[in-house]
Amino acid sequence: MELYIYAGIGVLVIIVIIILVNSKKRSKGESEALREIGESDPKRDYYVLSDILFHDGIRQAKIEHLVINTSGIHSVLEYKHEGEISGDKDDDEWSYEYKGVSDVFDNPIHTAHNLKLSIDKVLKKDYPLFFYIVFPENSELKRKRMDFPVLLSHELKDEMNKNFKSRKKISSNDVKLIYDLFLKVKNR
């Protein structure tokens, strides 16, 4: 009889541990874009930074995710808005509708343009810059021609891989210097 009680408690403990481990994995992988980008790999001159806030002298700028490698500097603007996303490059605001709730947010194309200006001010040198505007994979995007790619999270890696073949390259030394610069800016 006691054996059944201990076995039942053991099974219950194992189930609780499995649930906790899975929930931690989900909270770690909260960012779909970051899951696509992967982690830094200094041996391949591939560096990833997230949540960088800095002031360029005129405005406050935020970079959700930054990938620095020999092909260039790749900035990912990640939006958490799910549902149907609509907007045009010239609109002041875009909108989303999800489960009967709708709202507006600043045009991500304008945000990316401003971020490009801010990054240019910080770098003070002409490096290849790439921007990606990313929404959750279960969003619906009305595809239009935009200045920057507007993607679902599962499309990010393929789009970045196209730009990894960039003709203009950054030296390994400059990749590390740029990474150190943004790491320093991030830690202020």
Image (cartoon, helix red, strand yellow):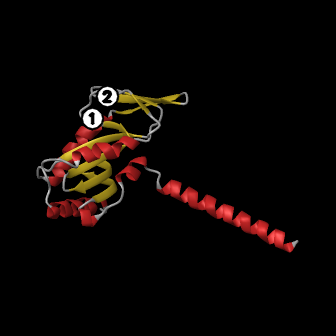
Q: Which residue is mark 2?
A: 92
> Looking at the picture, how far across and down is residue 111, in whole percent?
29, 38
Tag 1 near tag 2, CB within 8 Å: yes
Q: Which residue is mark 1?
A: 110
Mark 1 vs mark 2: which is more N-terminal?
Answer: 2
Q: Residue at x 35, y 52 (%)?
A: 37
Q: Residue placed farthest to the bottom in the image? A: 2
Say which element carries label 2: loop
Quarter of the image with the C terminus is: bottom left
Q: Residue at x 52, y 58 (%)?
A: 25
Quarter of the image with the N terminus is: bottom right
- Disc 2 marks a residue whose amino acid type is Asp
In terms of image quadrants, where is residue 140?
A: top left
Q: Residue placed farthest to the right in the image? A: 1
Residue 74 visible? The answer is yes
Q: Is residue 63 left or right of residue 128?
A: right
- Disc 1 marks a residue whose amino acid type is His
> Looking at the picture, how far across and down is residue 57, in whole percent?
20, 50
Q: Nearer the viewer, residue 2 or 126?
A: 2
User: Vertical placement of 170 versus 135: above or below?
Assistant: below
Marks 1/2: CA–CA distance? 8 Å
User: Vertical placement of 61 versus 103: above or below?
Assistant: below
